[in-house]
Image (tube, rainbow, N blue to C red):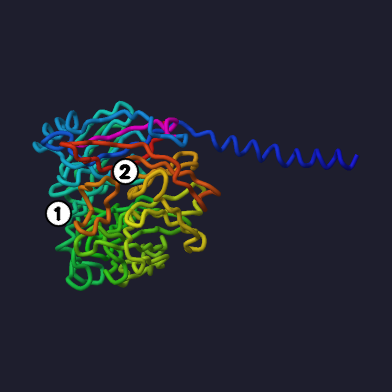
Amino acid sequence: MYRTRLLAAVLLVVLPSAFLVVASAVEPNHEVWVVDQSDTTADGGGTVYIYGGDALAGRDATSAVPETIDLGDDARSLCLAQTGTAPRRPHMLTFNAAYSHAILAFVATGHVVFFDAASRDPVACIDVGAQAHAAFPSPDSTYVIAANQNGKLLQRIATDYEAGTFVLETSATIDLVTCTTPSGAACQDAALRPDNAPICPVIEASSRWIFVTLRGGGLFVVDGKTTPMAIVAEYDRATIHPNGCGGVEASGKMYINSGGGTAGNPLESDLYAFPLSGFDAVPNSPNSPAPTLVFSHDDQGFVDSHGAVLTKGGRYLWVGDRAANRIVIVDTWSDHVVGEIPLSGAVSSDPAPDLLAIAPSGNRVYAALRGPNPLTANVAGVDNAVGSTPGLGVLRVEVNGARGVFQARAPITHVVDGIERADPHGIAVRPG
């Protein structure tokens, strides 16, 4: 009798656990959009590759056949019709909260193009000026923030996705060269913030606070709901290092990284955690509320942090390092580094992971893998962003994000005159 009861108890424990493992392996339908920056025509363009999530499920993703959008075709024609100029070098890709529209920023020009995500058709093109490095949508879907990098402007586009209207609000713009901070300091200052080209404007969940990283170091927190938009917190280059482009919100904090990729700062790897409370108190004193330095790997030599993604459940943050070919894993409960995923190996000898995105189930993380001739954020002679296998990397998530394995790669190629020119960068996941 005792043996029978013990066996029954074991079955009660084992069977549900086995069921959970099988159930978690079932991946909801989704698409992975990856942007190749390399020109499809002499006049520019580029390509968006769209992979079905089911084609990336196994260890061999090399046979995955993507759908493609040639950006030298309809998107170029639309921009010429609506702005009089053609877009070039597609760089950063995002989706609005409803995943009804894709938003693509072109870094060699000032174009931001909105696509109907289901039909793949471009529906609006806005030229913000000198250079649209990134365009991030607010979680409440009311606006998109454009980082006009070489124009050194932070610009807001009003969005109504249902009505299909997208309007550049010139009255909302902040000129990051001529403005003044809450403390009365010059926004751009040789000692405090020497180069105020905005890199990535990351918006927190309430859609109010925008964390704006700067090419020369320093950071601004901006109220995105005022007209014009207003700086509410200021940080100098000694506090926040240059070139941040990885922002993730978790556990009541906003995580922002710093990276390399510019001649004055080719190598960098830092991660900061900002408390999300305290920005209502205006004016804030400089460098307040104070961020926590989660890690600094600058003493490790060949490092260049860029993309970041939060694993499902919110506890673990993965931070990519395209120079060191690794993912650094941070526990957001303790703000400690708890491990890393080495990426050089059987799948790729030099993957150069850039931006990251996660599958809906949380079972996989996808990475854009740079090519041997990167078109952006690479310093000649340093080769911080050079990779040998351009494509889409597939990483298996283990232990809820505490571990991971580089599982497969879907190659992306664009050979011109015998030279591999493919350079994947922007990446985003759309549930389907």
Which label sits on residue 151? 1
Magenta span of residues: 46-56
Dot 1 alpha-carbon crowd within 10 angstroms: few under 14, some 14 to 19, many 20 or more: some
Q: Residue at x 23, y 64 (%)?
A: 265
Residue in the picture at 65% in, 38% down: 18
Q: Secondary structure at mark 2?
A: loop
Residue 50 is a magenta residue: yes
Where residue 65 sits, quadrant-wise, is top left
Tell me how far mark 2 sits from mark 1, CA to CA.
33 Å
Picture layout, residue 264 above or below residue 359? below
Residue in view at x 47 percent, y 48 percent? 311
Residue under label 2, please give it: 389
Of mark 2 and mark 1, the one earlier in the sequence is: 1
- Mark 2 and mark 1 residues within 8 Å of each other at the beta carbon: no
Residue pushed farthest left?
Answer: 84
Q: Nearer the viewer, residue 169 or 193?
A: 193
For the point 91% across and 39% down, the residue is 1
